[in-house]
Image (tube, rainbow, N blue to C red):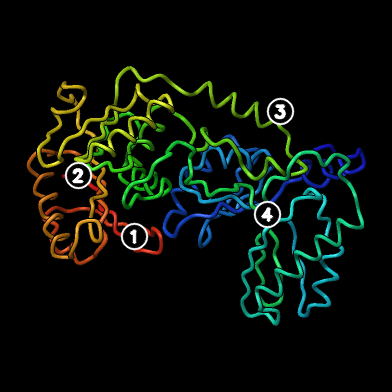
């Protein structure tokens, strides 16, 4: 992608040379965790606030690179493009024809348009999206800032929010949702998203310095998230592509420098601190393959065992663990095992097992049904989680 000199100067003056407004989208309840993650980054400025559904923050474009690379609990990062008022389609079309699209998109981008409209006279989402698509095409038909179109365009998505006839435009910097870490090539029967697993580990107090047991690992989400925390690997380290790489303002040298600096913090584990097991041999084999391909074998030990037949002494390649740590469980409730009665029975058995063999261990235990809370014999903290439209409960504390 080659830009002419005039456009380069405009991009430097108006995009890379200015403070931009960003929004880190999170699942409900993850805002504070994500805020703490963001504030721990070496940003150019630490001006941020928690709002419903995410974090608003200011920074340079390279701060957006950092956020995508590091935030374990964010779903995507948006950059604000601009805003205007429009109460009819004629005004909307005029605003779109005057908008400086070449600062944010290449001529061949053909972006997807995501519309949200509330309390506005323009409320038909498809009609608004059609105006945006045709407006962008018409704009680029009049201007030709790109002189080399030999490379395929990176997919882009523009989020449009209309409230009381006020339009706010944002461009997605992430591309695929950030829970897609680029590690797992396999799935389980009902895996939780990596962002949810990371939030659960953080809420349970996991630091990456103590043992983590994932004894019903399934696809291994808890184990892989824990392993990256142990080795200080950023959550986006294994991803090949982010949407910002297709922006006209993207600076590959700056991105490569950021990744190189992060690489200096990655450590080699002296011995595994994450211990994964499952009764299903195929799940264990698939997880082991992902671990090997991602060079995480120094931090994770995988074995095929039934949770109800193990104790901490079964891990660490046969050596009894010298310290307590965290047990993380996303048991196969509901549709994976049958009726609510069976789920209730499984939950009771899990609690009994934890009390018997994991005394003084911290736990992170996911529940699909709040009715099961009546069966808790120990004092645990409760956190609401949202996963795939389902409302879950996370229990944390010490057994």
- Marks 4 and 2 sit apart, C-alpha to C-alpha, by 42 Å
Judge from the rendering whether residue 271 lies leftward or rightward of residue 264; answer left or right.
Answer: left
Label 2: state its secondary structure: strand
- Determine whether the residue tagged by mark 4 lies in a helix, strand or loop: strand
Q: Which mark is residue 398?
A: 2
Task: Point out the tag, 3 or 2, that comes first from the N-terminus.
Answer: 3
Judged left or right of residue 344, residue 98 is right
- Gap in angstroms between the C-alphas marked 4 and 1: 29 Å
Foreground residue, 280 or 182? 280
Residue at 40% in and 19% down: 268
Examine the rendered structure and indicate whether residue 313 appears above or below residue 270.
below
Q: Helix or strand or loop: what does disc 1 sit on?
A: strand
Q: Which residue is mark 1?
A: 384
Residue 9: x and y, percent?
Answer: 88, 40
- Disc 2 residue crowd, few under 14, some 14–19, many 20+, Cα 10 Å: many
**Chain-order first, disc 3 or disc 4:** 4
Label 3 belongs to which residue? Answer: 253
- How far apart, in angstroms, are the residues tagged by discs 3 and 2? 46 Å
């Amino acid at each position: 992608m080659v830009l002419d000199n005039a456009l380069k100067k405009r991009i430097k003056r108006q995009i890379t040379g200015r403070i931009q407004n960003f929004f880190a989208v999170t699942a409900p309840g993850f805002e504070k965790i994500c805020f703490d993650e963001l504030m721990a980054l070496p940003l150019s400025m630490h001006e941020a606030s928690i709002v419903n559904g995410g974090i608003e923050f200011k920074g340079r474009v390279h701060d957006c690179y950092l956020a995508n690379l590091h935030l374990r609990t964010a779903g995507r990062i948006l950059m604000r493009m601009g805003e205007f008022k429009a109460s009819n389609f004629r005004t909307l079309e005029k605003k779109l024809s005057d908008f400086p699209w070449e600062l944010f998109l290449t001529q061949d981008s053909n972006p997807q348009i995501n519309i949200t409209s509330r309390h506005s006279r323009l409320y038909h989402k498809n009609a608004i999206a059609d105006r945006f698509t045709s407006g962008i095409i018409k704009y680029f038909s009049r201007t030709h800032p790109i002189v080399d179109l030999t490379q395929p365009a990176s997919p882009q998505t523009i989020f449009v929010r209309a409230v009381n006839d006020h339009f706010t435009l944002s461009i997605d910097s992430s591309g695929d949702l950030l829970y897609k870490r680029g590690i797992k090539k396999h799935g389980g029967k009902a895996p939780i998203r990596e962002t949810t697993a990371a939030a659960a580990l953080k809420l349970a107090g996991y630091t990456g310095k103590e043992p983590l047991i994932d004894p019903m690992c399934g696809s291994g989400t808890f184990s892989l998230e824990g392993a990256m925390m142990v080795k200080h690997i950023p959550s986006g380290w294994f991803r090949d592509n982010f949407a910002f790489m297709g922006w006209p303002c993207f600076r590959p040298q700056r991105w490569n420098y950021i990744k190189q600096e992060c690489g200096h913090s990655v450590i080699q584990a002296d011995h595994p601190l994450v211990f994964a097991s499952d009764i299903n041999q195929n799940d264990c084999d698939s997880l082991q393959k992902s671990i090997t391909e991602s060079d995480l074998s120094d931090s994770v030990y995988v074995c095929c065992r039934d949770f109800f037949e193990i104790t901490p002494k079964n891990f660490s390649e046969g050596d009894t663990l010298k310290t307590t740590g965290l047990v993380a469980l996303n048991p196969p409730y509901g549709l994976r095992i049958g009726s609510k009665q069976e789920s209730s029975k499984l939950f009771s058995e899990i609690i009994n097992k934890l009390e018997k063999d994991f005394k003084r261990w911290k736990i992170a235990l996911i529940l699909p049904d709040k009715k099961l809370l009546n069966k808790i014999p120990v004092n645990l903290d409760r956190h609401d989680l949202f996963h795939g439209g389902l409302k879950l409960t996370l229990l944390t504390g010490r057994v």
